[in-house]
Image: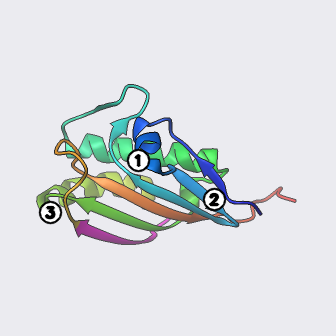
């Protein structure tokens, strides 16, 4: 299978030179995704809202690659302030509680000061009922 690249339409992808997601074989690699609403290129100030938007962005990227949230096997969470992590737990559980991927939380600076969380996931496509 050829390697395929997918874009969210974010100007950052073109300016920096990366893809929102890359599919290689059965694997989907979704780049670190922040809480920007790519349609409006705006970002909410709250970490909870950013976390939820990041997951919506990830879900959209996975859909482009014919994947879904249930295919996620690994998640990395990057936050500049470790105090912002516990408030995100209910959002993470809402999106990943059923899948329960392996995950890591890292405290590190992000690209811009308004960014409060970045989420990167790896997914593996599985054969689904009705697939040939």
Quadrant that contains the N terminus: bottom right
Kindly report which numbered mark, 1 or 3, lies closer to the viewer in this rendering. 1
- For the C terminus, the quadrant is bottom right
Q: Is residue 48 above or below residue 128?
A: above
Disc 3 element: helix
| Residue at 54% from the left image edge and 46% from the top image edge | 61
Of marks 1 and 3, which one's residue comes earlier in the chain?
1
Q: Please name the residue that numbered disc 3 is placed on.
A: 82
Q: Residue at (16%, 45%) from the top-left corner? A: 113
Crowding at mark 2 (Cα within 10 Å: few <14, some 14-19, many 20+)? many
Q: Is residue 71 left or right of residue 109?
A: right
> Which residue is painted at 19% across and 41% down in the image?
114
Mark 2 near mark 1, Cβ–Cβ under 8 Å? no
Look at the image and tell me whether residue 98 can be seen. Answer: no
Can you tell which mark lies on residue 23? 2
Q: Which residue is mark 1?
A: 16
Query: Position of 66 compared to 31: left or right?
Result: right
* Residue 58 or residue 109, whichever sits in front: 109
Asked if residue 70 can be seen in this view, the reply is yes
Q: Residue at x 54, y 53 (%)?
A: 21
127 w.r.t. 44: above or below: below
Q: Are marks 1 and 3 in contact (CB under 8 Å)?
A: no
Give the distance between the C-alpha atoms of the residues marked 3 and 2, in whole angstroms. Answer: 31 Å
Which dot, 2 or 1, sits closer to the camera?
A: 1
Identify which residue, 33 or 98, lies in the foreground. 33
Highlighted magenta segment, given as a residue range: 97-106
Q: Position of residue 111 (x, y in %)?
A: 25, 50
Q: Residues within 10 Å of mark 1 (few under 14, many from 20)?
A: few
């Amino acid at each position: 299978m050829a390697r395929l690249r997918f874009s969210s339409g974010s100007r950052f992808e073109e300016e920096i030179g990366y893809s929102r997601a890359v599919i290689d074989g059965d694997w989907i690699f979704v780049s670190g995704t922040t809480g920007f609403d790519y349609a409006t290129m705006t970002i909410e100030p709250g970490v909870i809202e950013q976390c939820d938007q990041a997951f919506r962005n990830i879900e959209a990227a996975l859909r482009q690659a014919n994947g879904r949230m249930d295919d996620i096997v690994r998640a990395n969470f990057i936050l500049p302030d470790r105090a912002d992590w516990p408030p995100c737990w209910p959002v993470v559980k809402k999106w990943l509680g059923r899948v329960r991927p392996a995950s890591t939380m890292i405290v590190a600076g992000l690209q811009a000061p308004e960014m409060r969380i970045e989420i990167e996931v790896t997914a593996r496509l599985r054969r689904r009922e009705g697939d040939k």
